[in-house]
Image (cartoon, helix red, strand yellow):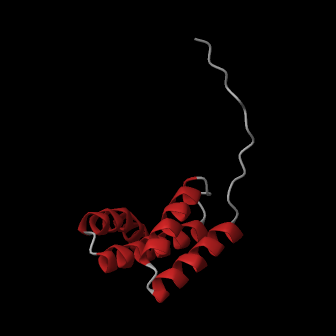
Amino acid sequence: PLFYLLLVPVTLPTMTDLSALLTDLTGRVDSGDVEGGKATLANLKIALLDADPTSDTTAQIATSALELGVLLSAADGDLDAFARNVSQLKPHYASASATAAAS
């Protein structure tokens, strides 16, 4: 079979997009909307995959999102998701403490 590669332009998320998703996620966590929060967290994690990995703002948004993910998984009683979110969060804390130690 022949396979065709379709080149579709990809729009990278802007900081405004990421901030809006984080604001939505924060609101859902604050209001106790666990299911909506999990969906927003998933969308935010996907958007972060295409964001600038060298940006301090991206790192701050990712850290905040993962912290909220920990809270969501605890509220949902999902220990596996809790462990995943904590595991994903640890490198952000390690990076932040290394940056603080260097200055």
Q: Position of residue 1 (x, y in %)?
A: 58, 11
Q: Please tell me which residue is depicted at 37% across the width and 79% down the height of the picture.
A: 71
Query: What residue occupies the far right of the structure in this picture?
Result: 9
Q: Quadrant of residue 88?
A: bottom left
Is residue 92 visible to the viewer in this orientation of the structure? yes
Q: Residue at x 41, y 76 (%)?
A: 67
**Residue 96 location (% of width, % of height):** 43, 72
Q: Nearer the viewer, residue 6 or 88?
A: 6
Q: At 55% from the left edge and 62% from the top edge, which residue is drawn?
A: 43
Nearer to us in this view, 85 or 24: 24
Q: Quadrant of residue 73?
A: bottom left
Left/right of residue 59 with respect to residue 35 in the rendered view: right
Q: x, y percentage for residue 47?
A: 59, 58
Q: Quadrant of residue 7?
A: top right
Horizontal side of 26 relative to 11 (left or right) equals left
Q: In the picture shown, does residue 84 fall above or below 26?
A: above
Q: Residue furthest bottom?
A: 31
Spot occupied by residue 12 in the image (x, y as percentages of width and height): 69, 54
